Amino acid sequence: MNLEVLVQDDAAALAREGARLVTEVAKRAIAARGRFTVALAGGGTPAALYTILADGGAMSWENTLLFFGDERCVAPDNELSNFRMVREALLDRAAVPEWNVYRMAGEDEPAAAAASYTAALKRALGNDLRFDLVILGIGEDGHTASLFPGMPALEVQDLGAIATAVPGYVEPQVHRLTLTFPVLNAAHAVLFLASGAKKAKAVSAALKGENLPAARVRPADGSVTWLLDRDAAAGAA
Ligand code: 6PG
């Protein structure tokens, strides 16, 4: 595994550099394999990056397949939905063919939605479930995607996507759909995004390999890039 830590001045610079990195990976993947497959992070940090991608005009959307790293089990127009965040930040602004968007069905019964997403991953990626890029965030507890400390989902090895409850301290208190570690660790490249002082402790612990879900993202045959702003990098002594 190849590990790189990049520190930007602030959240705006992080979004710009993140968009540049994603565009670079996309161009290389399309040149090598004719398409770019990416799993998008949810939450709030990536939104500005997605908008720069959408407005930047450098992405070949007809050759880009968009997946989700995780989703809240709510309707796609719910304000908690990661799909809604991606729709507003990216899909409403860029000419992404709708058949290139693989949405997790947050509105469906969670186990059924996870099973159908696992099947969709296999159909699109093949049995190796290998993404060109997985974009991830990190929570203050060290979770990533919806792989939370102490939850059974951390140990799933035979499914690409799974439904999971969230620990009691987590908001929003809704079930989630999440990619599993076998998928995250099959990726050609992983890009972690972290912004703000609240993330510094978790980022530092993850980089030290402490027992946090984010620290278990270690693609054997891939690269991991941590893209941080100065506040999130403050703890990474
Ligand atoms: C989610 C995300 C989650 C997120 C982290 C960081 O559904 O919330 O997938 O893993 O990436 O919680 O979230 P922020 O970017 O909002 O800090």
Image (tube, rainbow, N blue to C red):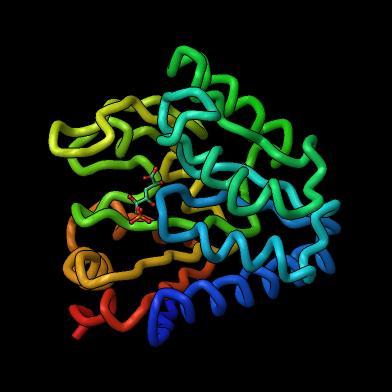
The image quadrant of residue 103 is top right
Q: Residue at x 69, y 52 (%)?
A: 37
Residue 73 coordinates in the image, percent (x, y)? 42, 25
**Does residue 158 appear anywhere in the picture?**
no
209 relative to 220 in the view: left or right: left
Left or right: residue 96 compared with residue 160: right
| 143 horizontally vs 23: left or right | left
Place residue 177 in its image quadrant: top left
Q: Residue at x 55, y 50 (%)?
A: 40
Residue 199 drawn above or below residue 165:
below
Q: Which residue is rendered at x = 31% and y = 83% of the image? A: 230
Residue 164 position, x and y percent, is 33, 27
Residue 190 pos. (x, y %):
51, 62
Residue 15 x, y percent position in the rendering: 51, 72
Q: Is 129 on the left or on the right of 148, as rendered? A: right
Q: Quadrant of residue 11?
A: bottom left
Q: Is residue 186 above or below residue 74?
A: below
Outermost residue toward the left?
A: 169
For image coordinates 27% across by 54% down, the residue present is: 139
| Location of residue 226 with respect to 13 vertically, above or below | above
In-front residue for pair 181/147: 147
The answer, for residue 67, to whether it is visible in the render is: yes
Q: Nearer the viewer, residue 130 or 84?
A: 84
For the C terminus, which image quadrant? bottom left
Q: Name the foreground residue: 107 vs 207.
A: 107
Q: How many marks?
A: 0
Closer to us: 179 or 60: 60
